[in-house]
């Protein structure tokens, strides 16, 4: 039994799910998710995976958690208590991500394990890419705004998604200190790079601060569509629309990472920021090898 701790927004949940799902499939054991952190603290839109995708996943019960974690069923408390000498044997089942880089030792975890971390690298689940893509299939759009926009993207000769994330990366002190928002120069350099290869780009700009985009980015050389109507529980539809585009300029955000990754085209060009966090951190395993880092 593999239990994945889920926390954070949709993009984080997708990484956590994909990693644990791949391990469970490799080992031939059951796969469950622990959503208890969302019951204790409001994070983004809460547990979204089960609402957005039709996933064959079961939420871990207290009995499931006790089977794997024993007496201490709180993942946050267990992360501390598992370091104590008397709990070393139990801690082998509690596996916390030690660093941001890909860790191949994770595949050697026991058949009963609780996974606590972000696991942000496709290398964790690339062997099961087809399965992950199939499970992360969006349902058809139901509202006319997104239906029309999806049609416009699919009819475009060269649709490029551009994700500009501001919001909490600017207004939340903790997120601003850790993640930070990307500069206008990143986007201008990314578009200049694409323009040298793509003759007739049509931009679909996704942002929670369209006014900032208009004030700070010169997009006058391209046809532009600004997308900001999908908010709250409907925010995920931006990711679905991004995935329909041919090429991508992503933010330092797991949300647009998945929007680009779910585009299965072998010919796509994806521009990603070298600096994913404010402080220097090795993100070589986060960005797929075929993507361009600027």
Image: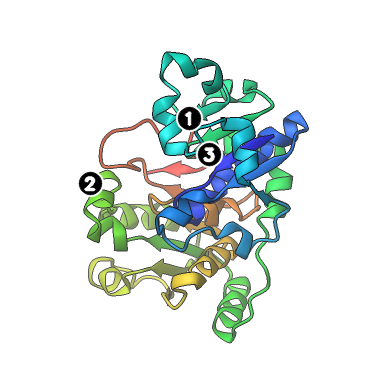
Which is nearer the N-term, disc 1 or disc 2?
1
Q: Position of residue 38 (x, y in %)?
A: 47, 55
Q: The N terminus is located in which quarter?
A: top right
Q: Residue furthest top?
A: 85
Q: Position of residue 18 (x, y in %)?
A: 62, 43
Q: Residue furthest right?
A: 28
When asked about the image quadrant of residue 81, the answer is top left
When asked about the image quadrant of residue 126, the answer is top right
- Give the residue at mark 3: 288
Q: Is residue 178 visible?
A: yes
- Of discs 1 and 2, which sits in the foreground? 1
Q: Secondary structure at mark 2?
A: helix
Cα–Cα span, label 1 and label 3: 23 Å
Which is nearer the N-term, disc 1 or disc 3?
1
Q: Position of residue 161 (x, y in %)?
A: 48, 63
Name the residue at 52% across, 28% down: 95
Name the residue at 44% across, 49% down: 271
Of residues 186 and 131, the one drawn nearer to the viewer in this rendering: 131
Kindly identify which numbered label has been placed on residue 96.
1
Q: Residues within 10 Å of mark 1 (few under 14, many from 20)?
A: some
Q: Is residue 101 above or below residue 181?
A: above
Kindly identify which numbered label has been placed on residue 177.
2
Q: Secondary structure at mark 3?
A: loop
Tags 3 and 2 in contact by the CB under 8 Å rule? Answer: no
Name the residue at 39% across, 58% down: 191
Is 27 on the left-hand or right-hand side of 246?
right
Q: Residue furthest front?
A: 71
Q: Residues within 10 Å of mark 3 (few under 14, many from 20)?
A: some
Which is nearer the N-term, disc 3 or disc 2?
2
- Of discs 3 and 2, which sits in the foreground? 2
Looking at the image, how many numbered discs can be counted on the residues?
3
């Amino acid at each position: 039994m593999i239990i994945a701790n889920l926390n954070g927004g949709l993009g984080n949940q997708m990484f956590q799910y994909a990693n644990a799902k791949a391990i469970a499939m490799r080992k031939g054991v059951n796969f469950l998710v622990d959503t208890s952190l969302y019951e204790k603290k409001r994070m983004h839109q809460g547990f979204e995976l089960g609402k957005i995708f039709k996933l064959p996943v079961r939420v871990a019960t207290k009995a499931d958690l006790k089977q794997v974690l024993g007496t201490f069923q709180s993942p946050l408390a267990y992360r501390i208590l598992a370091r104590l000498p008397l709990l070393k044997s139990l801690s082998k089942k509690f596996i916390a991500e030690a660093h941001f880089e890909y860790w191949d030792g994770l595949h050697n975890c026991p058949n009963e394990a609780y996974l606590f971390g972000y696991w942000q690298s496709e290398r964790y689940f690339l062997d099961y890419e087809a399965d992950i893509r199939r499970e992360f299939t969006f349902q058809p759009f139901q509202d006319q705004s997104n239906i029309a926009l999806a049609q416009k993207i699919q009819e475009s000769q060269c649709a490029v998604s551009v994700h500009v994330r501001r919001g909490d990366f600017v207004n939340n002190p903790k997120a601003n200190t850790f993640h930070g928002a990307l500069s206008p120069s990143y986007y201008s350099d990314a578009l200049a790079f694409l323009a040298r290869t793509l003759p007739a780009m049509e931009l679909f700009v996704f942002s929670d601060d369209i006014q900032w985009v208009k004030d700070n980015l010169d997009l006058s050389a391209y046809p532009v569509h600004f997308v900001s109507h999908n908010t709250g529980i409907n925010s995920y539809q931006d990711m679905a629309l991004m995935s329909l585009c041919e090429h991508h300029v992503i933010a330092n955000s797991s949300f647009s990472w998945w929007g680009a990754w779910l585009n299965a085209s072998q010919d796509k060009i994806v521009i990603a920021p070298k600096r994913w966090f404010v402080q220097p951190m090795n993100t070589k395993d986060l960005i797929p090898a075929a993507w361009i880092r600027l």
